[in-house]
Image (spheres, rainbow, N blue to C red):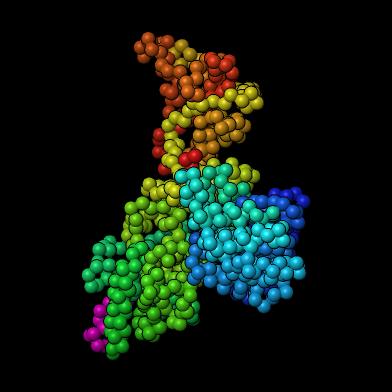
């Protein structure tokens, strides 16, 4: 771990600096070194990120503490190895109990347990770390003896209210609740957030998790996910709203949305124009048949260049299990037909059909594979590959359905057909070809993103990867990639500036009318960045109003303005670089719960315009040269804007067009000084105008609807 030595991590407790090298982390580092595909730099990065996360958790050496964190990775980017390294560092630094919410199903919990036990080698080291799965109060004496003996307990628990409540009953004892605890909620955006928040109640799993937290004297609760929309959009006062956030950058060789939907998208995307016959009739659509041919050719290429690792295909068409049965039957019939054809002599006319399909697939694959074996080599190798192909992996909950996390893969090539069970959490080894036609009337960004099972560490065989889908599905994933890039850029920027996650402006760019997440967990509204944003509810706090008036005064003293006259009214204009206006004016003005101006989103929108080099200057207009305008509140609201001259014509030199018509097509921030008639309080109100021009329109955004 050479690169992480000497790194300085900001800590939530200035007396607490996590140990980066200890017996557990050293043991895990040696284990990871056995993975020849994981470079020294990649291992160092994993441990450095874990240390960064742990540094923001409570000091395990103190009796009390509580922190909620959010750890964001990319879909299929290896979050499991990240949180296992985090567990190792936590043990080295004094966390005595580690709890993993390991999945919603026993199969997924078992998959996570297998990985955990393998990485940490738990079962062979009871003298140091002892594993428990779904423990109950019956395990109290044994667990207490382990902890009193100086060892650590690692608990995996099903994400189910009954199992979590059993754990709560166990750990609520006075003997166990005192031990510092790290809770890791894998796929933390799923199930755990409160689905009854709009009804003023607590959903069962949310309540169970919160009850568990309430009995632990010193603990950290970490949600780990690649789709954090729900975690970031829940109300900031919610106990699951993160107090800190760490981005886990993907490792070397990761291929995600920017790979498949970026500048090289034409290499990987293949359009399906007609899906009508996919789940009906007798045959498969031509494009799906071509996809199976491409899969077989890709398997041959990988074998010919010495790659003996699994080669997989996914067909994700529907959430309905009956549809899976139909597609599975059709794929099985197709493969059986191909096996028969490929068993014939090369000059037999009975294999002309399969030759034509495989040759078309070969021509496609050859456009990205260099050097590419000859057509004859591929054709001959395909005869072997089809014998090593299992084509009936129907993944669903039917009795004849299978689960790839529990069933052994005995053949090199596999085709998986399914729906909901393949949405998230399941890793399909060697996934190269995907057919996805599943859509829904109401789409949620986090749910759809999790269907991208084709993301992952595929650099070594990326040249044989293909995605077959409808144009609408491709457009959705392209929009979701823009959405993900946007909030990652924003989170990185706020982290670099030291802005706490609670203050992060939750402004999500999201097109195509896609919802960010489930509305029963976090409501969102559309934010319009262009047009007028006006503060109608103003602060009346003496401390805040005094601060804001002083900020405006200092800003105007530092920046020379000029008097500009509109009709018979004069204002003070300061034309200034946009970043200066944000840094020296907007960021220093304080808003409280009484104000209604969308200040975090308006400021963030301007910042993004600046970063995209779409906005250079802002006109700051001090209305009436700083004279206070008297306003009478109506239901707690005022109208800071002055209208046009009611008794003058536009041709009159003294005609005033009204505050909202002074912008001259430029971005303008109006500063209004207000005196409230009923109380005499002197305060401020802001109004921002962003012209509805293509230059300033960054598309649809959503924000929390609190």
User: Residue 524: where, in percent of width, then height?
Assistant: 45, 43
Q: Quadrant of residue 673?
A: top right
Q: What quarter of the picture does the N terminus occupy?
A: bottom right
Q: Quadrant of residue 466?
A: bottom left
User: Residue 546: where, in percent of width, then height?
Assistant: 64, 23
Q: Is residue 113 visible?
A: yes
Q: Main secondary structure of the magenta part?
A: helix
Report the residue that reaches farthest toward the bottom. 345
User: Residue 133: where, in percent of width, then height?
Assistant: 59, 69
x 27%, y 67%: residue: 279
How many numbered badges does the structure rendering display? Answer: 0
From the viewer's side, name the closer residue of 646 and 168.
Answer: 168
Q: Is residue 572 left or right of residue 178?
A: left
User: Residue 180: where, in percent of width, then height?
Assistant: 70, 58
x 43%, y 23%: residue: 660
Q: Quadrant of residue 265?
A: bottom left
Q: Is residue 180 visible?
A: no
Look at the picture and state if 531 lies above or below 503. above
x 43%, y 35%: residue: 530
x 40%, y 64%: residue: 420
Task: Tell me, yes or no, whether the highlighted magenta stretch contains residue 508.
Answer: no
From the viewer's side, name the closer residue of 46 and 185.
Answer: 185
Task: Tell me, yes or no, whether the highlighted magenta stretch contains residue 355.
Answer: yes
- Per the rendered image, the range of residues in magenta is 347-359
Look at the picture and state if 357 lies above or below 104. below
């Amino acid at each position: 771990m050479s690169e992480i030595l000497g790194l300085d991590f900001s800590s939530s407790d200035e007396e607490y600096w996590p140990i980066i090298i200890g017996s557990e982390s050293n043991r895990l580092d040696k284990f990871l070194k056995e993975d020849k595909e994981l470079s020294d730099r990649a291992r160092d990065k994993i441990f450095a990120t874990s240390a960064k996360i742990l540094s923001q958790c409570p000091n395990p050496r103190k009796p009390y503490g509580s922190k909620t964190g959010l750890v964001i990775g990319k879909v299929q980017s290896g979050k499991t190895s990240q949180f296992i390294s985090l567990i190792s560092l936590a043990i080295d630094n004094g966390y005595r109990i580690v709890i993993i919410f390991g999945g919603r199903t026993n199969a997924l919990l078992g998959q996570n347990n297998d990985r955990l036990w393998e990485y940490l080698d738990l079962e062979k080291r009871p003298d140091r770390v002892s594993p428990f799965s779904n423990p109950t109060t019956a395990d109290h004496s044994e667990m207490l003896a382990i902890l009193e003996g100086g060892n650590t307990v690692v608990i995996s628990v099903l994400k189910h209210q009954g199992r979590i409540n059993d754990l709560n009953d166990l750990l609520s004892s006075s003997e166990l609740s005192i031990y510092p605890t790290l809770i890791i909620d894998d796929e933390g955006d799923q199930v755990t957030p409160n689905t009854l928040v709009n009804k003023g109640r607590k959903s069962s799993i949310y309540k169970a998790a919160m009850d568990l937290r309430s009995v632990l004297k010193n603990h950290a609760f970490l949600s780990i996910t690649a789709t954090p929309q729900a975690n970031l959009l829940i109300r900031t006062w919610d106990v699951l709203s993160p107090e800190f956030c760490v981005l886990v950058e993907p490792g070397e060789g990761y291929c995600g949305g920017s790979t498949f939907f970026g500048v090289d998208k034409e290499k990987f995307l293949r359009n399906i124009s007609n899906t009508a016959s996919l789940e009906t009739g007798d045959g498969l659509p031509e494009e799906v048949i071509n996809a199976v041919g491409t899969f077989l050719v890709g398997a041959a290429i990988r074998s010919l260049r010495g790659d003996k690792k699994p080669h997989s295909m996914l067909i994700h068409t529907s959430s309905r299990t009956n549809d899976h049965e139909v597609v599975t039957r059709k794929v099985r019939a197709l493969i059986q037909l191909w096996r028969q054809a490929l068993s014939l002599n090369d000059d037999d006319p009975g294999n002309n059909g399969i030759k034509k399909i495989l040759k078309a697939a070969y021509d496609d694959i050859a456009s990205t594979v260099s050097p590419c074996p000859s057509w004859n080599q591929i054709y001959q190798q395909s005869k072997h590959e089809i014998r090593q192909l299992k084509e009936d992996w129907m993944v669903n909950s039917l009795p004849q359905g299978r689960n790839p996390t529990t069933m052994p893969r005995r053949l090199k090539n596999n085709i998986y057909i399914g729906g909901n069970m393949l949405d998230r959490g399941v890793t399909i080894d060697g996934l190269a070809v995907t057919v996805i036609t599943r859509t829904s009337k109401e789409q949620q960004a986090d749910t759809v993103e999790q269907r991208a099972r084709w993301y992952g560490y595929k650099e070594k065989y990326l040249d044989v990867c293909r995605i077959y889908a409808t144009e609408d599905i491709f457009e959705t994933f392209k929009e979701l990639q823009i959405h993900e890039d946007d909030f990652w850029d924003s989170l990185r920027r706020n982290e670099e500036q030291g802005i706490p996650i609670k203050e992060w402006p939750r402004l999500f760019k999201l097109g195509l009318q896609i919802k960010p997440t489930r509305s029963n967990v976090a409501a969102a509204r559309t934010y319009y960045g262009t047009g007028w944003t006006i503060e109608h509810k103003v602060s009346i706090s003496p401390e805040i109003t005094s601060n804001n008036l002083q900020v405006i005064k200092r800003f105007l003293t530092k920046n020379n303005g000029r008097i500009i006259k509109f009709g018979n009214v004069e204002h003070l204009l300061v034309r200034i670089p946009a970043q200066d206006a944000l840094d020296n004016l907007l960021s220093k003005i304080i808003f409280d719960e009484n104000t209604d101006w969308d200040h975090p989103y308006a400021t963030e929108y301007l910042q993004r315009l600046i970063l995209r080099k779409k906005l250079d200057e802002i006109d700051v207009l001090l209305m009436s040269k700083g004279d206070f305008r008297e306003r009478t509140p109506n239901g707690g609201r005022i109208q800071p804007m002055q209208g046009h001259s009611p008794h003058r014509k536009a041709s009159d030199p003294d005609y005033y067009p009204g505050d909202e018509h002074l912008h001259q097509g430029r971005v303008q921030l109006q500063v209004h000084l207000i005196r409230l008639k009923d109380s005499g309080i002197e305060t401020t109100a802001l109004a921002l105008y962003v012209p509805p021009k293509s230059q300033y329109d960054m598309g649809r955004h959503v924000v929390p609807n609190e």
